Image: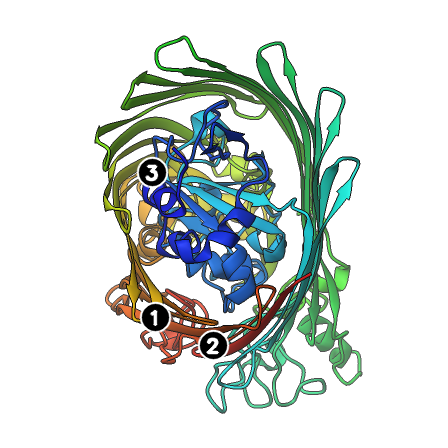
Amino acid sequence: MKLTPIRQAILLGLTGAAAFALAPSATAQTQAVTPASAAQDGGMQSVNIVGSRRVGNNSATDTVVPVDYIPMTKVTEQGGQFDLAQTLTNISPSFNSTRQSGADGADLVDSAALRGLGSDQTLVLINGKRRHTTALVNLFGARNRGNTGTDMNAIPLMAISNVQVLRDGAAAQYGSDAIAGVMDIQLKKTLGCESVLGAGQYTEGDGTNWLASAYCGVAVGGGVLGITGEYLDRGRSNRAEEGNPRIIGDSKVKNKTVYLNGEFPLGPGKLYLTAGAQDRDASSAAFARGGVGSDDIPSRNSEAMYPNGFVPFIDADVDDRYGTIGYRTRLGEWASDFSQTYGYNRMRYTTAHTLNASIANLDLINGGRGISPSQFNAGGFAFRQLTTNADFSRFYDGVLGGLNAAFGFEYRAENYKIFAGEPGSYIDADGVGFGGNAGSQGFPGFQPGDATDRNRHSSAAYLDFEADVAPRTKLQAAVRYEHYSDFGSTTTGKLAGSYKPTDDILLRASASTGFRAPSLQQVFFSSTFTDFVSGVPLDVVLAPNGGTVANAAGIPKLKEEKSKSFTLGATWTPTSSVSVTADLYQIAIDDRIVLSGRFDADNYPALGAILQNLGVGQAQFFVNSVDTRTRGLDLTASHRMQLGAGKLNTFLAANFSKTEVTGVHAPSALAGYEDVLLSERERLFIEEGGPRRKVTLDFDYILGQLETDFRIVNYGPQTLGTFSGPPVPNQHYKSKTSADLAFTWAFSDKTKLTVGGTNIFNVHPTEQDPNETDNGFKYESVQFGLNGAAYFARLSHKF
């Protein structure tokens, strides 16, 4: 049976936009985005699908768990979003990413997550190989606070063939981080060249985006090398009211990215490689400091430097590098794959348009005007990951209806560094005792005591079986053992199956255990700044695990999070033009790692006394202390029809999820202080950091050379906490609906022009009390952001 595009959409359980890209009206582009590793066997289209290691007669209909297969050609040529994170947010209901504002480094790297869980509980692959996370730990103002994550925007859209989203726990197959699911980004390696020019702007007149991107696949040594270059310039936006000195909106970003992806015959097998580099210059605005007449002089400002107040800028140079080289061949009857992957992410901070108020005050005391440097090197951090894989698989025709057996090994080495800033970025020069005057305003630099250089390694082995136990029944089983040098060993397993009672119905279910290793960033991140308590200078510390402060506070060594996942779903194909899928899921996580609240002498006198003996006024820690349970439902439906002289494709996709904290287990040293360890505000960030409902409805109508796309996205309500806490009521965000509209004119098969708008009705989140929000503004970066309507234009051309 040769798979039609609509049948692929049906049986994979695609999101609406993904199914649209596979609709018959886009057959030509569908073939263009078929994974380059696909093979033909007896007329059946074979594809590599994440979550399955099956070889031989593997087709897109063989998956026993829900997988979204999202070709990227259409959104690359015609989409209103210019980066991968925002593009996927508008396509996949189970995927969520919201740009932060007023959240320090989290403003510069968009965190992303599946099914309402943390950004570090989703594993990201490139061409089936593990991609590194960022060096950043989300802290202040971030939805995924305490989490690390993968920087999706380090990968240019033009380089991507398709994105596959495995909506199921897969730690037994892929290892750590795959609790919520797995995203596999398949890169292009096809012959031919194409380019895209894009421009966009918010209707407020700011946040201008410029995009120039090009891909060219060239024949090299009997294979193909794909080369992608991209330049993205995203301007700053500001939604602060007139008279408000704050800058609230998108950070300023300039990305320069190059990616290579190729495969070449070599001896009895094929050599493949992927290499990518991005340099990002980014700048976000910190909270404003007041001028003459405010309490900020002389505690946080200098009258001589900024008499009218100022807004510090947190600037960062972000370097991201990625590379894989590997070789696929056959060893007897076994298909084998050997690879080495390298990942590196570094962020260096500069605090600009700022001052160190203690330096300015000391200058004033010494008879000067009260001047400080206005820019400081604040230090930064870096993360490096090296992953070695050896994978083997074999298909046995004569066992049951067909059995695929796979096994493999993985070795991973990681390194995390924090480097200190220049002294002026953190010192208290005057020692007078104004709270908050030490260090560079907006972002105090990392101190020498924060600097670290830590390593760890892990080893893993897995077994994977997938069998046709009957003509209509498939089973999959996997088991994986991993050993980490820092916390020990873990074993996980998975069992999944599917059954087709009729040709039109597929039933599927899975059960699995999983884990997530504590990241080196969580274990060793350290941040210190000086404040004054009763006139005494004391450090406020985010204390690294295993360090002097954490040990004195009785904080235990971090260990892995453990999960149990269950899915139950079905697909229904009543006609060739209609498809419906539904998948229920439950994910229970024990010992989830969270960032505690701040402990001090006021909320825990005994611990506060211990801390003060160490010169520490307040301290917070990463701890394995929270159990959660996430339950949800994924729904998709697609329909295509002839309407007048054109074709109408309609798609509906929805995700309903609810995360609950089911237990808080404080370490013995913190027992009785669970409300400080996890306040209601922090609990709500875990439970409702993302909307509990997202529904996408897409109408695409093609009439001759004109294509019209109208997409509606409904975001469910959210409830977040306040700084004041009870009796101050929580922040309630009402359900909101955003709409995008785009028109594409095809001048030819090779050239298309798209114009349109996003959030065309200029919808904003529910207004809140600025004194109780994370970013100090009436709009928070929830649901779909706070910037409002935008318009864009995109010109694509294939050579």
- Element at label 3: loop
Tag of residue 645: 1
Q: Amino acid at mark 1?
A: Ala
Spatial separation of the CA atoms under disc 2 and disc 1: 23 Å
Say which label, 3 or 2, has the lower sequence index. 3
Identified at 35% across, 64% down, the residue is 647
User: Between 15 and 656, which is closer to the camera in this rendering?
Assistant: 15
Which part of the image, by quadrant, shows the N terminus?
A: top left
Residue 262: x percent and y percent? Answer: 70, 40
Occupied quadrant, residue 413: top right
Label 2: which residue? 756
**Residue 353 in the image: above or below residue 798:** below
User: Between 600 and 122, which is closer to the camera in this rendering?
Assistant: 122
**Residue 208 in the image: above or below residue 5:** below
In front: label 2 or label 1: 1
Tag of residue 311: none
Say left or right for 702 vs 313. left
Q: Is residue 672 visible?
A: yes
Label 3: which residue? 671
Say which label, 3 or 1, has the lower sequence index. 1
Occupied quadrant, residue 443: bottom right
Say left or right for 255 vs 294. right
Say which label, 2 or 1, has the lower sequence index. 1
Spatial separation of the CA atoms under disc 3 and disc 1: 70 Å
Q: Residues within 10 Å of mark 1 (few under 14, many from 20)?
A: few
Q: Residues within 10 Å of mark 3 (few under 14, many from 20)?
A: few
- Element at label 1: loop
**Residue 168 in the image: above or below residue 217:** above
